[in-house]
Each structure stands twice: as structure tokens, then as C-alpha cells.
Image (spheres, grey):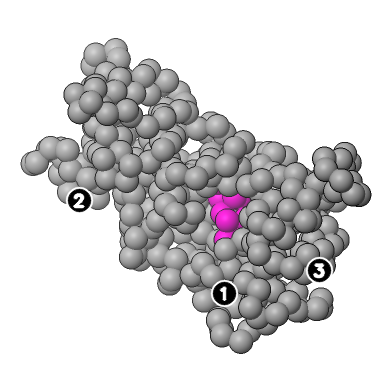
Amino acid sequence: MKTTGDQQLVKHINRSVLLRLVRSRPGLSRAQLALRSGLTKSTVSLLVRELIAEGWLCEDAVASTSGLGRPSTPVQLDGRRRGLIGVELAVDCLRVVSVSLTGEVLCSLEEPLESKLPERVCAQASHLARVAYGELDARGVLLTGIGAGLPGAFDQATGVVRFAPNLGWRNVDFFPMLTQALQAAGLPSVPLHVQNEADTGALSEYEFAQEEIRETLIFVTCDVGVGAGIVLNDRLYTGSHGMAGEIGHTILQVFGELCSCGRRGCAETFVGSVALQRELEFSGNVSRAGRCLGLLVQNLWTTFDPGVIVLGGGSCVRQPELVTFARETLHNYAAAAGMEPPVIRLARYGLLASAVGAAALVLHQHVRPMYPLHPLAQREMSLRMDVGAPIPPLTEI
């Protein structure tokens, strides 16, 4: 995508700035948006009018009367006219949701995974996405985009799943495969975004937060596999090849038990669902796994210094005592160091966190137009840029 002298891009950036402001601070007036964004009042007025017409924003019915002069009308994200679809490709099942721009779950579907062959996974996921789209269409809601989260390292630059050991995938050309499956299922041609399931879980908390989150946020998911999604400086931190946050394959014991990835002593062999079930059968509790999870969280804390750590995934939802042991372990480490630990809480969306976060991925990417995309997605976005309205000056970025 061109970044110099491209007026369409500048307009898209300005629109994105306004959407991000409204998302993080709902209820601002046009004048307040102009003041906070640095754009002129006329530009803000024009763009807000467009965004309202397109279903991105709506005006609050109650106007603000503070101060002198005419009452100002608060603006907020419109949770009624646009929707997002999120797909979670878990190790043993598929979850698909449709979500409003404000994070309300409109529809949720779940099916056991019929096959781990990539082509068949994409076909099954696309069928469920088509059902979810039908629900949106029946409500008169416009589909804005589709996101997908999967249990592996996804290289956003190439669209390739580098490493998904619990699915048995290595170097799978996933993005075009899913694109074709969605088209074959009759889904409309909308932007598609793919990311690791822990990363999408993090976005379910970050993009749809009830309050503005300024600090680093980490989402830890515990199920068959164990991973972490990291939001750092308002962006997902995914590493050079999409493998950041693969904490399930950090080593907790040298020459330990063989892991599905081929290494020995990985955290997954202590905290993954197989190890968890074995521990329950042997001792009747999950104290050992909980302490290992607490150790992982402690290491994430000292590495990234997050303000919030969210624990999610099937194991944390079904075995809440796992979270209790992990929290106690972290607090013990913090007390030994004389430090205050970060906030730890359960995922807001429970088992739907990664699917809802996959939908949030669409919003996350849309309001950050300089985000690196897979070439196919980049081409789609460049074709869809709105070019009908007047363009603000190039200096207004």
C-alpha cells in the first residue's frame, strides 16, 4: 500500500482516528473530537456525518448542555447496524459468533471438529460462518468483516500457519485456503483477518473493554495447548514470525516429558488439559498445575510488566481452582520481591473469548490502517476505501 501522497489513505487514517477516539471515549461531541484528534472542526463534522451514514457511529439521544452556546450531541459507536463474525478453530471444536461493534454477542454456534485436515477445517468453519451471517442478515445488520483465531503461530505477512502442533499443522498456506472456503460457502466479500487464538482472546478484552485500557494487557489461554496474547503499545505483539506468546512451549523442566511440539519439559506438559486430567485422576486436585501456571504468569509479569493479566480457555473456565492456585503463586512471588502484582481476572466472555476476539480483530485492524496485512487482505482494503467524499488536507493525519 502506498503511504506517500495517497489521499485515500489519509482520509482512511483520519476516519480511523475518530473511530478509535469514540471507541475509547464514547460520548464525545464533534467539537471535543476535533480538539482531541487535532483535525479541523469542518473535517470532523464531515467524517462523522459519513460514519453515521455508514452505520459506524450514532448520536446519543441526550445532548450535552454543559457550558454556553448550543447543546452538543454526544457520538458513540453504533451497536445496531454493523456486525462482525469471529471464528475460533480450537483443537477439538469450532466456535463461531456474530458480534456488534460494541461487543454484544448476537449469535453463537459450536460444533465438534470433524477433521483436522486444513481443507476440511476451513470448509466446516465456513459453513458455520454462513449460518452466523444468515442471523445477521435476518436482523438487517451489515457484515463488516470476518476474523479467525487458531491454536498455532500464524505469519501475518505470508498467511501461513507456521506451527500448530495440536492440529498437526506445519507451514499450512491457510489464509488463501480459508478465503476460498468462505467464498464457496456464499459469504459476501468482506475483509478477512487471521491470528493466533490467544491473540484474539486478548483483543476480546482490549477492544471491547468496559473501560479504556492504557497499559499492557496479556491474555493467557489454557486448554489442550497453552498460549499468551500480548497487547503492547496499542498493538498486538506477535513477533517476527507470529510465534510470540507461545508460552506453552517454554521449558519448565530440562529433559522432562515429551511434548507434542517435539521438545521435552514444555509448560504444556504441566498445564495443558491432558496433564490437568492426569493430575485430577492421580491427586484429585490441580494444585501442581495451578502453581506451574502461576510460574508462567510470574515470568510474563517480569518480562512485560502488564497492568492486567486475563486467564481464559477451557481449563480455567471449567477448573476455576486452577486460577486460584495461579493467583496465590503469583502473589507469593510478588510478596517475596516486595512488589505489587498486576491485576489478574477471568476472561469476560468465558469459552467464547477467542471467537469474540477474532471478531474484535476485524475492528482492531480496521482502525489501524498502517497495520501490516497479508497481501490479499491489503489488496481488498485498498479496493474498498471510500473515495466519494471530499479529502482533508495531507497535513491532517
Mostly what secondary structure, the magenta segment? helix
Which quadrant does the C terminus fall into?
bottom right
Above or below 358: residue 10: below
The numbered mark at residue 262 is: 2
Q: Nearer the viewer, mark 1 or mark 2?
A: 1
Report the front residue among 241 and 57.
57
Residue 42's label in the rendered image is 3
Distance between mark 3 and mark 2 Cα atoms:
60 Å
Type of amino acid under label 1: Gln
Residue drawn at 50 percent across, 32 percent down: 347
Q: Earlier in the sequence, mark 1 or mark 2?
A: 2
Residue farthest to the right? 70
Q: Magenta part of the protein: which range?
A: 357-365
> Nearest the camera: 8 or 31?
31
> Is 93 drawn above or below residue 127 in the view shown?
above
Q: Nearer the viewer, residue 359 or 261?
A: 359
Evaluate whether residue 253 shows in this view: yes
Residue type marked 2: Gly
